[in-house]
Image: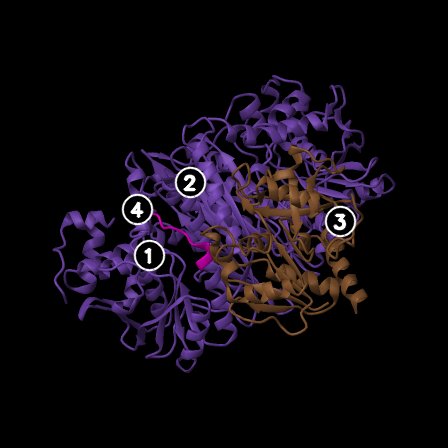
């Protein structure tokens, strides 16, 4: 093997490998690694690729159901939706790159997740994203919002996928460490799903797509370390996206898949050529030999080390059926993409890298993945916080004034400024656009529809990781039910701080346990996901943010429910119990200035019961409008329903034993607001009561204001101005 | 009506357009690859759909305008054949010299996707016969570079010859800067060439044709074209 620089302890540390991890490498290969080999190990064994801190806990997540075709472990999860169709979806973070270089970081996050989906043979039909930014007053926040949103739009719009939903939040704990979680959903024939496992010895391994450059080297390792003051210096590790190349790659890949040319396919994402080649070989119990002199490069003089670690975008690795080589090459040439046979499969189970006549690496392929360290990191459970008693919280403002203030806060105001920069209608299938509980996208020419949503409430997760984890799943479930969709499966994107700190690890373990319990109780398995740790800057961690991306199915998309109030005179009903839970509520935080207490508990049996009945009411067209109650509580939900329609409502419900502000702003879970024609209201209320489901009448639809009994009516137009005002004004400032 | 939809690398609304043409005309549409040198025999209508041809990394539409197939499109237009360019298609028509002017970046320098209102200026063209003059329709836009700009002389000629077919307006048909999301001169959303047979427009009528999807205001454009060819036949 060719001599490369001597491996020193400093070099090992620079590669993010701990001394004991390096010792493990020495034991495994029985000699000192070459520099290329050290790079390969660092790429395979970093947190991002190996899940070494999270693996033991992720095993507790439910991943199976009769409709699950493929659970975690492939490029994306796959579920069966009938009619010979499958939905392929996944969410992935691009947090660290998006902080260093917001436009390109976010753009390549979208590109990466799209590739994960079309690698499996699916045409992407929708994207969503969950974004967490620092305090709006932090000097970098505006620049980050602007760049991230433009980057997501710039990539998705050009690629040609509608971006239909998501979340945006602000909190000071994301100062210096914003989160960009991108989700893609695709549609495939259920008998034509493509996987990464290679099969057959001496099969050609083909490199497809864009050329390899020096960008993104060590991207995955960067994503596995904390940030400090020098984080901006890591800019060269961020890749540059080319959505045009990705669009060509999509069309070319789908075309050669239709022509039955492909044995196995893997996109080059994190750790590029290294990770994709190792996975193809290891999953197929085969060795892989790569001839790097044949790799298309855009720069001269690239070393083996650089080629193996480059994270240049829009690239794929494929094992082709040898007899189809010419046909496949013709298709790629037609689309103007690079096509090169760069290696072959071998029976040896060795990962052999040749460059310039030298062997640059010769490693056991199975062990590269399987023998990565697995850590049972010590953890401490987060201390339980006291329950805030509603009676002890003084209401500083009348209800209507509090609502007007809340609806214009950064966390509750309209996200129109964001989603108008995303093409959310391309494809001609967007039934419900951004702004509702869940997006609804028609499946081909219908009648089926898919509902999708991204949810998590990080302040709940911080206050009680277990309940917060449950709540993230429950809210995704609720949002899908609220449009009438049957929740099928989730993808999880687990964003946390440094797992080497026992309290952070405790947050992770608690959230994952909560997610597992909720997914089990709701028959809502996890089919794909991603873990992003070390989200810390100067030792301060983000709020624990396990984003849940949920997908549900409507048998008839035309029957999906929306939140807009429909008819003057309709009766407004609340489904679910209201205890007036103010702990960790937005009312307590943004009106009373107190971010404290235990978050609302989640009764999973009630979530399921209420979700099922709401779906039934929607399918049988018994309700005219439906909205789930979440952030901000009941009055905020009602305001959103009013603003979506311009109709007002008279609200005359008595809060009873619960203080009025806790009744209207408490964030009790498992609740929905529905409206019903007056003639059917009593029948509906008794139908629910017979099933043991709490229901109460809140008032009636009508007028142009929200008129809360005993308060000055609040015109919907005034609410609208507050709701739509904050985001554009903030972004225009500075 | 026999239609042909051009496909350049990076075009991405070709499937939306083909579906709409099928829904409204009942006929399958020919998808024509940019490297072709001829249009399918008997093509009545050529459509250049939306997208980001060649990534729009140069001026948008500039590379596509120089594709082999565009010579065939120029010949088709010279014979009086109808050509419709939507969004990137409008940009390509401007770059290819079939329409005057240029589409600049939106005034606010951001990509914008939303429903807008268009005032239909004339109903006596093949493209607008499905509407009444003065009618206001709601159709979506999705573009970053839709701000129509041309020199004063060109604008005066376009206006004088009644070649502006669509203008951004309020829901009541008032031309108002608040309802002109991209800042186009005279709120111009769509224009025709001097022969009246080549239309370029930024909004996407093809995305508003199915009642089950919520709005059918875009349907009139395609239904009018179908009628035009039925009458001709």
- In the rendered image of this protein, which colour is used for chain A? purple
Query: Foreground mark, 1 or 4?
Result: 4
Dot 3 and dot 2 residues touching (CB under 8 Å): no
Are discs 1 and 2 both within one chain? yes
Kindly identify which chain the residue marked by label 3 belongs to: A
CA gap, disc 2 to disc 4?
A: 32 Å
- In the rendered image of this protein, which colour is used for chain B? brown
Answer above or below: position of A261 versus A236.
Answer: below
CA gap, disc 3 to disc 4?
A: 54 Å
Q: Residue at x 77, y 42 (%)?
A: A689
Left or right? Give the position of B58 relative to B194: left
Disc 1 is placed on an element classified as loop
Return the disc, 1 or 4, that comes first in the chain's sequence: 4
Return the disc, 1 or 2, that comes first in the chain's sequence: 1
Query: Foreground mark, 2 or 4?
Result: 4
Dot 2 and dot 4 residues touching (CB under 8 Å): no
Question: Label 3, on which residue?
Answer: A617
Checking the image for residue A271, the label placed there is: 1
Q: In front here: B219 or A187?
A: B219
């Amino acid at each position: 093997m060719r001599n490369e620089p001597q491996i020193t302890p400093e070099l090992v540390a620079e590669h993010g490998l701990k001394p004991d991890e390096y010792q493990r490498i020495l034991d495994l290969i029985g000699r000192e690694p070459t520099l290329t080999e050290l790079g390969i190990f660092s790429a395979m064994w970093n947190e991002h690729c190996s899940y070494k801190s999270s693996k033991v806990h992720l095993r507790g997540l439910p991943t199976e159901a009769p409709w699950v075709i493929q659970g975690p472990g492939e490029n994306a999860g796959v579920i069966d939706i009938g009619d010979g169709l499958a939905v392929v979806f996944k969410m992935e973070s691009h947090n660290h790159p998006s902080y260093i270089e917001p436009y390109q970081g976010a753009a390549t996050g979208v590109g990466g997740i799209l590739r994960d989906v079309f690698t499996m043979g699916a045409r992407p039909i929708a994207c969503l994203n969950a974004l967490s930014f620092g305090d709006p007053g932090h000097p970098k926040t505006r620049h980050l919002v602007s760049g991230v949103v433009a980057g997501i739009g710039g990539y998705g719009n050009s690629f040609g996928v509608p971006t239909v939903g998501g979340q945006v939040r602000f909190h000071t704990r994301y100062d210096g460490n914003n989160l960009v979680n991108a989700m893609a959903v695709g549609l495939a024939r259920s008998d034509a799903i493509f996987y990464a496992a290679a099969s057959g010895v001496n099969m050609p391994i083909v490199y497809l797509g864009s050329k390899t450059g020096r960008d993104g080297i060590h991207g995955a390792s960067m994503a596995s370390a904390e940030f400090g003051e020098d984080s901006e210096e890591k800019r060269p590790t961020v890749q540059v996206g080319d959505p045009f190349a990705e669009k060509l790659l999509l069309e070319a890949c789908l075309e050669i898949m239709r022509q039955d040319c492909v044995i196995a396919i893997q996109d080059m994402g994190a750790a590029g050529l290294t990770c994709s080649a190792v996975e193809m070989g290891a999953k197929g119990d085969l060795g892989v030999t790569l001839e790097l002199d044949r790799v298309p490069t855009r720069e001269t003089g690239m070393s083996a080390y650089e080629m193996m670690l480059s994270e240049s975008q829009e690239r794929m690795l494929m094992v082709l059926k040898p007899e189809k080589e010419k046909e496949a090459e013709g298709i790629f040439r037609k689309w103007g993409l690079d096509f090169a046979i760069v290696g072959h499969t071998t029976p040896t189970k060795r990962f052999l890298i040749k460059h310039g006549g030298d062997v640059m690496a010769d490693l056991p392929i199975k062990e590269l993945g399987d023998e990565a360290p697995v850590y049972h990191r010590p953890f401490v459970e987060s201390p339980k916080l006291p329950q805030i008693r509603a009676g002890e919280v003084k209401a500083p403002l009348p209800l209507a004034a509090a609502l007007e203030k809340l609806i214009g806060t950064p966390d509750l105001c309209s996200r129109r400024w964001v989603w108008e920069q995303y093409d959310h209608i391309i494809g001609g299938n967007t039934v419900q656009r951004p702004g509702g509980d869940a997006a609804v996208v028609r499946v081909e020419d219908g009648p089926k529809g898919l509902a999708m949503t991204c949810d998590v409430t990080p302040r709940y997760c911080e206050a009680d990781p277990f309940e917060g984890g449950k709540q993230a799943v429950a809210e995704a479930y609720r949002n899908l039910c609220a449009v009438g969709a049957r929740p099928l499966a989730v993808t999880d994107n687990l964003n946390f701080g440094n797992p080497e700190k026992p309290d952070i690890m405790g947050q992770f373990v608690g959230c994952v346990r909560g997610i597992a319990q909720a997914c089990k109780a709701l028959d809502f398995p996890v089919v794909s996901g991603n873990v992003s740790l070390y989200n810390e800057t100067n030792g301060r961690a983000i709020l624990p943010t396990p984003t849940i991306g949920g997908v549900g199915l409507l048998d008839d998309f035309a029957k999906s429910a929306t939140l807009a109030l429909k008819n003057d005179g309709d009766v407004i009903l609340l489904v679910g119990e209201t205890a007036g839970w103010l702990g960790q509520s937005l009312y307590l935080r943004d009106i009373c200035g107190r971010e404290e207490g235990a978050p609302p508990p989640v009764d999973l049996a009630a979530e399921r019961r209420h979700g099922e009945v709401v779906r039934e009411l929607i399918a049988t067209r018994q309700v005219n409008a439906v909205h789930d109650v979440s952030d901000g509580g009941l009055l905020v939900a009602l305001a959103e329903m009013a603003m979506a329609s311009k109709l007002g409502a008279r609200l005359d419900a008595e809060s009873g034993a619960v203080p009025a502000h806790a009744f209207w702003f408490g964030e009790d879970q498992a609740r929905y607001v529905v409206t019903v024609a007056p003639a059917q209201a009593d029948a509906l209320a008794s139908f629910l009561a017979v099933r043991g489901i709490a229901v109460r009448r809140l008032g009636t639809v009508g007028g142009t204001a929200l008129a809360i009994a005993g308060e000055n009516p609040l015109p919907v137009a005034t609410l609208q101005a507050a709701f739509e005002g904050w985001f554009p004004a903030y972004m225009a400032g500075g | 009506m026999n239609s042909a939809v051009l496909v350049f690398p990076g075009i991405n609304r070709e499937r939306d357009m083909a579906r709409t043409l099928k829904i409204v005309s009942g006929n399958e549409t020919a998808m024509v690859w940019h490297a072709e040198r001829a249009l399918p025999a008997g093509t009545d209508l050529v459509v250049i759909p939306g997208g980001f041809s060649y990534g729009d990394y140069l001026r948008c539409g500039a590379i596509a305008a120089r594709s082999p197939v565009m010579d065939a499109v120029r010949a088709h237009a010279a014979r009086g054949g109808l050509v419709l360019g939507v969004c990137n298609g409008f940009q390509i028509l401007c770059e290819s010299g079939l329409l005057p002017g240029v589409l600049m970046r939106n005034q606010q320098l951001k990509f914008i996707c939303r429903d807008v209102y268009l005032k239909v200026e004339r109903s006596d063209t093949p493209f607008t016969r499905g509407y009444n003059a003065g009618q206001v329709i709601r159709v979506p836009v999705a573009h970053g570079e839709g701000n129509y700009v041309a020199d004063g002389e060109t604008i005066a000629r376009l206006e004088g010859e009644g070649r502006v077919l669509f203008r951004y307006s309020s829901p009541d048909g008032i031309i108002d800067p608040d309802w002109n999301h991209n800042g186009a001169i005279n709120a111009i959303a769509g224009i025709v060439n001097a022969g009246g047979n080549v239309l370029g427009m930024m909004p996407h009528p093809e995305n508003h044709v199915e009642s089950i999807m919520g709005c059918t205001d875009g349907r009139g454009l395609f239904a009018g074209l179908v009628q035009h060819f039925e009458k001709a036949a």
